Amino acid sequence: MRLLISLLFIAGFLFCNTANAQVLKLKGTVTDAGSGESIIGAVVKVKDMPGGVVTDLDGHFNLSVERPPPFTLTVVYYGYVSQELPIKSLDQEVKVKMLPDAVLLGDAQVVRQRISDKQKQAPLTVETMDLLAIKEVAGGDFYEGLGNLKGVDMTAASFGFKVINTRGFNSTSPVRSLQLIDGVDNQSPGLNFSLGNFLGASDLDVLKVDVIAGASTAFYGPGAFNGVINMTTKSPWNFPGLSVSVKGGERNMLEAAVRWAEVIGDSTTKQRWAYKVNAYALRADDWQAENYSPTEDSPTGVDNPGRYDAVNIYGDEDVSFNNNYATFSGRRSYPGLGKFLRNGYTESELVDYGTQNLKLGGSLHYRINDSLEVIGASNFSTGNTVYQGDNRYRLKDIMFFQHRLEINQEGKWFARAYVTHEDAGRTYDIYTTALRLQDAAGQTGSITGWNVPYTNFWGDNITPQVEAMPGYITATQAAGLGWNQATWITW
């Protein structure tokens, strides 16, 4: 039911497009005249007309105009000389080259600070990944790029589950770290920590990421003892249009994402409504755990006929009794049999290593006036992956819902309410599952359990082979030599 409500909420945004189909379009690019690099965020508008747009990551703009040329196009960007270009036709793209304003740069002053004076007095270290850094991340997604920031450690619990650690605390369960997306706590209610970006934001919708690699409890509460990961997504007012991304790689990895944002209305009216929708999908073959070496606590080694406790075999732990014939007087009937353990199950027998992740999101924005805005947003995530904690877990068909309602006046105040729902689906503990399978095959730790057929098999099949070996002395031969039972066993 919650899934249906979320999908209907997101689908409703798609039908809100009331843009005037008759509005003419002017396309173009804004670059630096010296270096040729794209200028991001330049304001482009028609002179003496309301409305306007800003350039995207590649310096492109797509401007709606209410009447055909001729008219004058104005381009403004801080630090550059403002441009006014006469437009006589809409048939060709406009190429605008901006010249630096040397006088303006010389007199520039910082009038606002991202970190307040109060924060500077506290032991905070803030590392930021902006739009350009996100775009240039060499890894699979922007979240992996956070591992390159100073004071940040990245732990890969599985292909789809990356964990951020700070302050030297390296753990796959960062319960003392806080992850925020647009000010909303993104942790899983059941696990009590955030599942990396498995339940997070799409690459195409992330504007910037601030990482506070230090104790931040004075500003964010006790959940931020190890630090804060604060993600900010793109506003549809500043980043309208369509964005599409497709990636492929090893382990049959395929990732696709799409983002659509639009400001409703044209430049002839006051634009008060905007919306955006996001969709992201990932599939890959996860890394397989195939370490079959003995654990540090294994009671036996690899040369033991009765097996040993392996790292990625579950259910072979020494959790029973009556399974050690090395000190049992009856061992003369079971020569060569010492301590024996259950076979257990390999992880590949218990886990499907396919990783899938689907994320859907959308938001509807209404501006009461130029500075006061109301936002309604909804996000849904689901998928399958492997999680490494105290034990190994298979997160299967997990679902995560988050809804937010907010009113804010930019830079001054906000009021926000949000709700988070989680469904663990068919998630299971791999180790516990192996023990339950063992119990179904024969109870462990019982005098009538699995060890009885094990010893019977040894006596019926292995003992004759051992007695047939050259130089072996049977109990009868030992008695003929005058050896008592204790002497024979010791020998």
Image (spheres, rainbow, N blue to C red):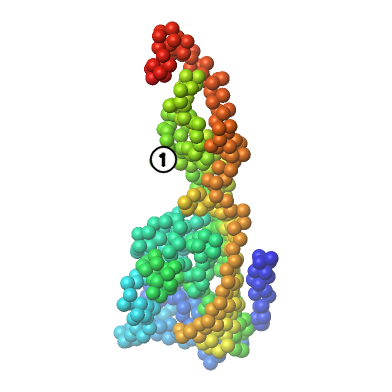
Q: Is residue 475 above or below residue 167?
A: above
Pointer 1 residue? 297
**Residue at (52, 60) in percent of width and height:** 191
In the rendered image of this protein, does residue 342 appear above or below residue 469?
below
Q: Residue at x 41, y 80 (%)?
A: 98
Query: Percent from the top left, x then y, of residue 321?
Result: 50, 34
**Type of the residue with mark 1:** Asp
Q: Nearer the viewer, residue 408 or 26?
A: 408
Residue 7 shows in the view: no
Residue 258 locus on image (x, y percent): 58, 66
Are there few (<14), some (14-19), or many (20+) residues within 10 Å of tag 1? few
Q: Quadrant of the N terminus?
A: bottom right
Which residue is at the front of the view, 36 or 122?
122
Relative height, residue 294 to residue 428 (above, below): above
**Most extreme residue toward the top, as rendered?**
480
Please state the horizontal and vertical placement of residue 433, each as a whole percent of the image: 57, 45
Q: At 61% from the left edge and 89% from the top edge, which residue is drawn? A: 269
Query: Does residue 352 appear to the left or right of 323 in the view shown?
Result: right
Query: In this view, which residue lies farthest toward the bottom?
Result: 48
Count all numbered tags in the image, as a single digit: 1
Residue visible at 62% across and 53% down? Answer: 426
Please tell me which residue lies in front, 488 or 10: 488
Q: Tell me the quadrant of the picture where the C terminus can be found.
A: top left
Residue 120 spot, x, y in % from top left: 33, 77
Q: Quadrant of residue 167?
A: bottom left
- Using the rendered view, name the quadrant where residue 14 is placed: bottom right
